[in-house]
Amino acid sequence: MKDNHEFDYNLYLIGLSGTGKSTCGKMLSQKLNLIFIDLDKEITKKEKTPISEIFLKKGEKYFRKTETSLLEKFSKKKNHIISTGGGIVENNYNMEVMKNSGKVIWLTASPINITKRLNSKYAEYRPLLGNSPNVKIISQMLEKRKLVYNQAEFKINTNNNSPSEVVKKLSKLLLKNE
């Protein structure tokens, strides 16, 4: 069942890779009849090359600059659900852009669950995590970003929830705060 909702802001999904930002964001956008943007896919489209290749050929600094540029572009719109890359929060400016133009939602999961998800045969390669993401690397990354992730207005744990359960929780949370 689709609900039509108009927000005069955007919804930003932040969190580590493998927490369900893209999957849940797409489902939530369909449920609320909002526009879904996957920032990583937008970068790939703009650059006409996969993210792993951007990192390899142009470096992380270039990638982050492109990411910020696209975030600024989409932050000027309304009624969008924007799934961000896990590292977008490492630039404090990006967090300010998101907080000033919408509601920021942190999707969390345990390092063990994230590792399982990212090592599934369906997972995409993540340049900062290498060929086989492990609990130690993911725990370190989470620790490094936790303070910034905690600035989110809402926090949803995706550990023991299916994407549809997460979407149900998110829509209740958002509509309650309208």
Image (cartoon, helix red, strand yellow):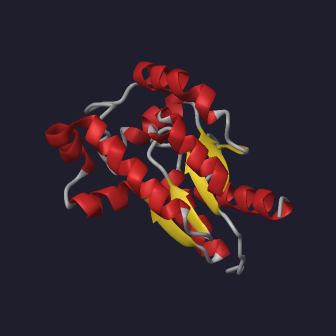
Q: Considering only vertical position in the picture, is 176 above or below 116? A: below
Q: Quadrant of residue 156?
A: top right
| Residue 158 visible, this angle | no
Residue pictured at 52% horizontal, 40% vertical: 93
* Farthest residue, direction left: 57
Residue pictured at 60% horizontal, 31% vertical: 148
**Residue placed most toward the observer, 157 or 78:** 78
Residue 150, image x and y in percent? 67, 33
Residue pictured at 79% horizontal, 61% vertical: 172
Residue 177, image x and y in percent? 83, 59
Residue pictured at 40% horizontal, 22% vertical: 137
Q: How many marks?
A: 0
- In the image, 51: left or right of 173? left
| Residue 148 visible, this angle | yes
Residue 52, image x and y in percent? 23, 44
Q: Considering only vertical position in the picture, is 139 above or below 164? A: above
**Residue placed most toward the observer, 33 or 78:** 78
Residue 157, image x and y in percent? 66, 41
